[in-house]
Structures are given as C-alpha cells and as structure tokens.
Amino acid sequence: MPDLPRNASSDQTVREAAVIQQELASELKYRLARTPERATEDDWLVAICMVVRRRVITALLATQHRRQANPAKKVYYLSMEFLVGRSLVSNLLSLGMLEPARMAMANLGLDLERIADREHDAALGNGGLGRLAACFVESLATMDLPGMGCGIKYDYGLFRQEFDGPAQVERADFWGSDHSPWLIERADESCIVNLYGHVEESHAADGAYRPAWIPGNTLLGIPHDMPIIGYGGRAANLLRLYSARASEVLEMGVFNAGDYVGAVQHQISTETISKVLYPSDEPSQGRELRLIQEYFLTACAMNDILREFSESGLPIEKLHTRAAIQLNDTHPTLVIAELMRLLVDHHKLPWDVAWSVTQATCSYTNHTLLPEALERWPVDLMTRVLPRHMQIIYEINARMLRMARARWGDGDPRVAAVSLIEEGGTRHVRMAHLAIVGSHSINGVAQLHTELIKQSLVPHFHELMPERFNNKTNGITPRRWLAQANPPLAALFDDTLGPQWVVELERLRELARHQDDPAFIERLARIKLANKERLARHVHGSMGVLLDPASLYDVQIKRIHEYKRQLLHILHIIHLYLRIVDHGEDVAPRTHVFAGKAAPGYAAAKRIIHLIRSVARTINGDPRCRGRLNVVFLPDYKVTLAERIIPAADVSEQISTAGTEASGTGNMKLALNGALTVGTLDGANIEIRECVGPENFYAFGLLAEEVGAMRRDGSYHPAQYAARSPALAEVLGTLIDGRYDSDREQYRLLYDELMGRDHYFHLADFDAYAQAHRTIAQDFNDRRAWHRKALHCMAHLGHFSSDRTVREYAREIWKLEGA
Ligand code: 26Q
C-alpha cells in the first residue's frame, strides 16, 4: 500500500535514482562521517534532506537571478505564525523526485516512508491562521509570484500534547531549528532592533519637529531563510524567519561598567524573545514579551523591505510600487507605526506623504470576530516599550478623529467608537483600528465573515471608508492536502484527468462525468477503505486501540474551543451511546475521531477534552458498544497527523455556532478528500455548500442572524430546550451522574454553563444536529450513493485552492504583475 505519492517509473527514474544514491553516499560520508553500516535512520534523514536541499538551492538561485534582471513588485506576508509541518516529502514532490528518491533508498535497503516519518514538524503556528500562511507562501511559489513570508524562528513551536489519563499535559516542542537542513542563516543581513528608552524632543533649523528615540535596549535580528519551492520546481521564494540575539555593542558597554553578571543576564533576556510561540487564547493582554515579539518581527521585516527597496534606486515615495505588505491579523500591525517612524524620522518625509505611502503599502486581513480575541495593548506598556511609536499612534489617532468629527459632528458616539485608544479604566491601543486606518485594504476570510466585519465588528469604519473592505475566501494548497496526503486518490485523479489538476484545481470539475460509472465509484470506495485501514493501523500502533475500517469515520480535528463546539459532538455521541445501552437500539457502526489542542490556560477547553476522553473510555470499555460505537481522541494534533487523518474521513464535523468561525480551512481539506460535511451555516461552510449543492451537505442549526438576534434581545433560555427534548435531557443528566468519572462533580461546571448561559447555543442546536446525523447514518447505508455524493463534492471544490485565493490577493490587493 503506497504511503506517499508516486511519479511514474521510467528509465529516467532509474538514472535519477542512481545519481541520488551516489549523492546520499557522499553526504553520509563527508557531512556525517558515517559508513552506511553504522548509519542510523536519522543519519539517512539528514543525508536525503541534504541531497534535496542542493536542488532546492539551485532552484532558488535561478529564481533570484531571473528576477534580478526584471525587478517587479513583491509581496511581504507578515505573520507571527507559519505552520509549515514537514518539508522533505513536500520538497521531493515539488521537484518531481519522489519516485527516484524512493528507488534510491530502496536500493540501499531503506524505506523512504520510514525515514521521512522521522522529520520533526515545524510547528510554528497555532492552527488555521498559521497554516493559511504556509499554504499562501507555497501557492505564491507555485505561481511564480514574487513574495516573501516574514516570521519568527521560534526555538520552541506549539507545545506537544500528552495525556495524564483524560487530562492534557503540555510538553516543550524543541524542534532543533539550529540544525534544520531547510534553514540558511543569513548573519550578514542581520539588523538592529531597539526597545524601551525615551524620546528626546528637538527641532530642526526650519522649526520642524525632529524627535530622537534614545533606546534603552538593543538587540539583533538574525534572518534564517527557508526556501519554499513551487510545485514543478520552476520557482522558489523565501520564508524568512528571524531569531533574536543579544547585541554585542550593548554588551560591551555593560562589561565596561563592570557589571559582568548583568551582561550575561541581558543576554538571557534578549534571547528569550524568539524562544517560544505563544499559544492562542493564552491571556496575552499586557504580556510584555508578546508585544516585543510582535515589534521584533515588524522591525526586522521593515528593515529588509527598505533594504531591498533601496536597491531599486527609486525615491522612497515610490515604496508602494515595489512592495506590498500584508498583515496576517493584527499581530504585525506595529509595522504601520514603524514605517511611519522610518519615513518621517529617518527619510524626513512630510507626515501626509508618509501616511499616503504607508496606506498604499499596507493591507490587513482579519481572522476573528470574537471580541475577546481582538488585540489591545495597554497604553502604559506601549509607551514604555516603544515610546516613539506610541507618539506616532497618538498623532495618527488625532488626525483620524479630526476627520471623524468633521463627518459626524463633535459629540457623536461614533467618534469614540473609532478611536485607536480605548478609554475607561486603563487605556488601551486597539490594534485592529490601527490596522484599518493604516491600510488601503481590509479583508475577511469568507463571505459571511466579511459581511459581519462590515456590519457588526467595525460598522463605523465601514461607513467612513467602505471601499477598503473586501472579501478573500480562504483556500488550501492541493499539493500538500491532496497530492501528498492522499497518494491513492491523487493517482486516481492523475489517471482520470492527467496531472494538471494539481496546479489547476478547477479541473476536478471533469470528475463529475464519472458519477454514474459504477467501476469508478468502486475505485473511490476502495481508496477510502485503504486510507481508513491505514489510519486504523496508525491508531493501533500508537494507542493500542482497534478501529473498524468498515464503520463510518466521523472526524472533528481542530483546536479545542468552545465556539467550535466539540461539546455538541460529544453530547451527540453520548446520545448514541444511550440509545444502545439504555434503549437497546441498533445503530449503524461508527468511529468518532477527535484531535486538537487546548491552550494551556484555557480551562473550559481542557474540561471538554477531559469529558471526551472519559466518555471514550466508558464507551470503548463497554462490551455492548463493541462493533457499533468507538471513540478516540488522538494525542498531539499537528500538520503531519492531519495528513494521516483527513484522507480517512467519511464525515467532516464543522459545527461552530453560526457567526463565530471566520472561515475554517479544515472543512476544505476534509471535503477535498471525499468526506461529506455536517455543518452549520458558518464561515466558508456556506460557500462549500453552495459549490457542492445542498443535497450533498448536511446543514443544520441556527443561522448567524438568529444567533445574533437572540444574543441581542436575551431571548435564549437553554434550560427550556432541555425541558422540551427528552433525548437532550437524558444526555445532560449523565454528565452529573458519575458515569464517566468517579467524581460526580467533575463535569458540574460544564453542566451548569450549558443549562444556565450556554453562550454557544449547544442546546438550541442539539435536536437539529441529531436529526442531521440520523440522515447521515441512513445515507451511509447506501454505500454507492454515498461515494457518488463524495465524488460530486470533490468535483466542485476547485474554488478552494489557495492558488485561487492568492491570485485574488495578488490582483486586487497587492497589484502584482503577472498575477
Ligand atoms: C494573539 C495574541 C497573543 C497570543 C496569541 C494570539 C493569537 C494567535 C493565533 C490569536 C489568534 C490566533 C489564531 C487565530 C486563527 O487561527 N484564526 C483562524 O484563522 C483561519 C484562517 O483564516 C480561519 O479559517 C479560522 O476560522 C480562524 O479561527
């Protein structure tokens, strides 16, 4: 059974395999000083990565050389997160080297799959936002568009998840980036980053205000480049990740003052800046280190952007003709103040000119509607860490408020609503407001989300500047999420459509012609079964749990968050369980697969994991459920685990409370791999449903509008739903009867929240959700009709390629040539 995609084997493959084999031997000998007899799998991993790295670098230099001859506008994608995952297989795939590499390894008596499985994931992101950034840089390279991702080289990625019984335990994820074969240190392009200190007021001879920022602390940003090779190997871009290092200049000063211990101390504290990725939902307000990380990224990236621009010889007023800066959420928003500072203080541009250049260069993507997730920084903190930037933010605000007053009148409440400063108690800087006023484009990530930004999140900004708001529905790269993750399905697509679908996903439309071909449907069914068997082997090997590949695999994999409603899913599983054990009913065999991490400080999310794992233990240990109901929570969800689970899914759970999930991208990955979706009309689910047709999408639940109305008028009373639905009442009762945990009070808080406030409307949607699942169970009985639906879905999902998304950004926001 193939685990990885296969390119056709030919004489050429044999020749290339021979070359690779020779290079492998050379790497092993001269880089690692090892003989093949003594080499470990990790040695071979290094050797094969080095062989691939040579070709990656060749492609990179060729791309840079070609572009130097013809300079064009370039996008800088600024993101605190790039959730890249592994790179060996994706690079092999892009370079068309998979088959020869496999053959070379086999000739040496080695298994490429086994070796590749030893690579550590680069987990430099939390979830959707970080993975989107990784898909975008891949699409940019594949489409040969000039672009660079700018991020942080964290020493520790997102924590590893382990379990102590049902409870999540976090472990540090040290991913060994200092020895990564995919990173090239560029110490020669290091930059200085200043922090703290004060602003000295002074005036130029002409009376112009010329402030000088006297920093209190200085550190170095060291770039590390990860080449991102486009599919087909024709172009490569860079993902540039900065690490922080103590600046020797400053250290010397401290030494001279005789404070030896202080100097060493200083080194420790500056180097913590790129030490660890913050888990989202961690209370970040007032976390000085996070603010410094955000500024560190911003300052390093801005330094590179201006250095590259200076090579054009153009005047700085033309920056926006050569550079587009995309802000991935508000996390890099300080770039607006930083660019203003550099243009006004260093390049001596008049404020208005500097402001026009900044706005024309920057654009902002919003990824969340949850009010508690909007970034705000205490003014005191910002003043202490970045005194000159705070002054600039005040000036931006003063000018914007003048405009708002001119428009609405002095006392109008809308004026205070758009202010960059939130008053009352401790004052805060509203980063989304800064991002909005400093950008020429503000986009949401799905149609509904963009509408909600305009109507509910920042309606007054929309009123002031409607032309800046636009939608860019998310997408995913079909290379990683189909060609790489699901080789058997990709092979079927190759056989049916030719190879071009990988870069033109809309070509999947032609699959629809095979909907009524029983032999084709049968092939699809077999592929799904093989993928389910493969996942079952993995689960058995890693957790010792046996799954039944003939059962329906119902999958919910994503961060654990109340709004994503894993709780609704587990309540429904309890309902199925009670139907079996208390009512003696027969239910169609099902396997429920969960995976996902809870932020370490998010107690409610941790309780949900605890409940799922306890219910799983109860159900899996109950002989009455054998062969009918199975529940697993797989530990340590990450890109690599997603690649394993997604091809094996029959049903994709996308059940967030309507109006809360900005887009979702797992919904796209699962559907593209032939899972049918049970989902609310939320985020990109709505657009997926439009594409695949309502008869191929199990929609249920309240609409965003209905949820919004009930929230506003306070008309939601969850206990009433429990009173009206015996099935629901029964399920809820088991949360506090000691069935899943010997401590009856273990899930009391959860129960009280559901019956009392139920902020995410679980109870309101429960019956509709259970009904949708009854339909699914019936439909799954007719296996041929089921796979026909799955095929119809896949055929109509071409729209959700990140190539399409990136092309829209490139044409409509970044204005890149050749997009
Ligand atoms: C902020 C401050 C301090 C520490 C962490 C953070 C932080 C980090 C990550 C806040 C939010 C995030 C991540 C947000 C995210 O992943 N949003 C998701 O973005 C996807 C891509 O657009 C969407 O598909 C999802 O709907 C959205 O939830």
Image (spheres, rainbow, N blue to C red):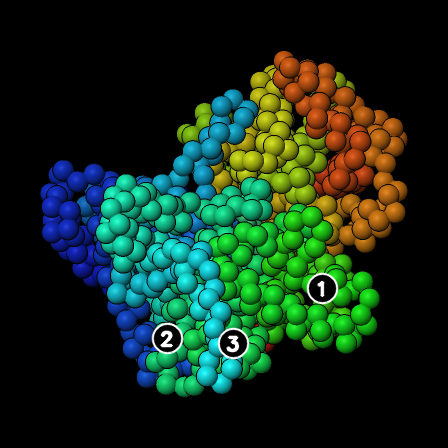
Alpha-carbon span between mark 3 and mark 2: 29 Å
Q: Work out which quarter of the rendered image holds the N terminus and state it.
A: top left
Residue 149 shown left or right of residue 88 in the figure: right
Residue 352 shown left or right of residue 304 in the figure: right
Residue 80 shows in the view: no
In primary-sequence order, the first of circles 1 and 2 is 2
Alpha-carbon span between mark 3 and mark 1: 27 Å
**Label 2 belongs to which residue?**
308
Given residues 525 and 604, the one toward you in this image is 604
Q: Are marks 3 and 1 in contact (CB under 8 Å)?
A: no
Q: Are marks 3 and 2 in contact (CB under 8 Å)?
A: no
Element marked by disc 3: loop
In primary-sequence order, the first of circles 3 and 2 is 3
Mark 2 belongs to which amino acid?
Glu
Given residues 407 and 129, the one toward you in this image is 407
Q: Residues within 10 Å of mark 2 (few under 14, many from 20)?
A: few
Mark 1 belongs to which amino acid?
Val
**Label 1 belongs to which residue?**
418
Residue 738 coordinates in the image, percent (x, y): 68, 15
Residue 719 coordinates in the image, percent (x, y): 84, 31
- Which mark is on residue 209? 3
Nearest to viewer (mark 3 / mark 2): 3
